[in-house]
Image: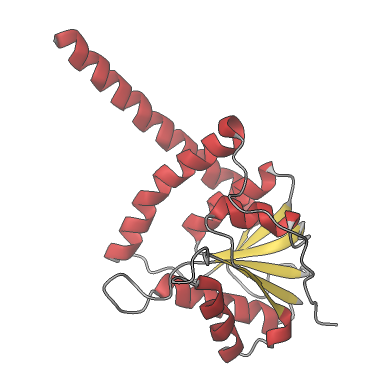
Amino acid sequence: MVRIVKWVLGFVLVTVIALVVINMSISKQAESDLYKSIDNIPSKKAALVLGTAKYRIGGGKNYFYLYRIRAAAELFKAGKVKAIVVSGDHSTKYYNETSKMQKDLIKAGVPSQYITLDPLGIRTLDSVVRAEAIFDLKDYIIVSQRFHLERALFIAKIKGQKVIGYMAKDIPGTAAAYRMKAREYLARAKAFLDVYILHTTPKFHGKKKKVNYKK
């Protein structure tokens, strides 16, 4: 019995250490490619906005969503990008992240013809891989909060893409922020397994789609 307890404790310790190492490594590799200032970020042809629900479970605004929309609109209106691809989950008729993102970007001042929808970006890996496979984005800006951007940049770079991240405003110190960051530890471990061991591909594929760029 003592031997079993020691084995379990040892396994838990190794798992925790692995999670911490993976988390720190992913954060470190993204550090030089993250931008907070609209003035400092280099211009690219397009931005990829990673989706999330517009409203929290139980009701109320999801500020992660709201700030991503604001950041994407800011990039476009500052002339830093000429097109925006919104990528999120619309795998069923009952849930549509990308349509809401499109409508809110239009409200924020982005012309509809320069917004392209990827309704099959059901997870971050899918969004990033499909950005190149479906929309021909290879050198672009990813928009999300820092904790999410670091993982997205990690995946994109492993896939050979040249990407930088524009950090949407975070909501530090809130219960939602703590929950998201706790989940991110596991998400990063899964991303590590996906790209190095499992070689996971997007759930959905499809034909190439043209992105309309502002001239």
**Residue 66: where, in percent of width, then height?**
46, 78
Vertical arrangement, residue 75 with respect to residue 200, above or below? below
Vertical arrangement, residue 35 with respect to residue 60, above or below? above
**Residue 179: where, in percent of width, then height?**
32, 57
Vertical arrangement, residue 64 with respect to residue 10, above or below? below
**Residue 164: where, in percent of width, then height?**
67, 58
- In front: 207, or 108? 207
* Residue located 25% across and 20% down the image: 8
Q: How many marks?
A: 0
* Residue located 68% across and 46% down the image: 157
Describe residue 157's horizontal placement relative to residue 3 as left or right. right
Work out which residue is located at the far front of the displayed protein and give it. 93
- In front: 69, or 127? 127
* Residue located 38% across and 74% down the image: 62
**Residue 77: where, in percent of width, then height?**
68, 85
Vertical arrangement, residue 158 with respect to residue 117, above or below? above
- In front: 180, or 118? 118
Can you see residue 197? yes
Work out which residue is located at the far left of the displayed protein and give it. 1
* Residue 124 position by quadrant: bottom right
Q: How is the image coloured?
A: secondary structure
* Residue located 41% across and 36% down the image: 20
Describe residue 30's horizontal placement relative to residue 9 as left or right. right
Picture quarter with the C terminus? bottom right
Can you see residue 31? no
Picture quarter with the N terminus? top left
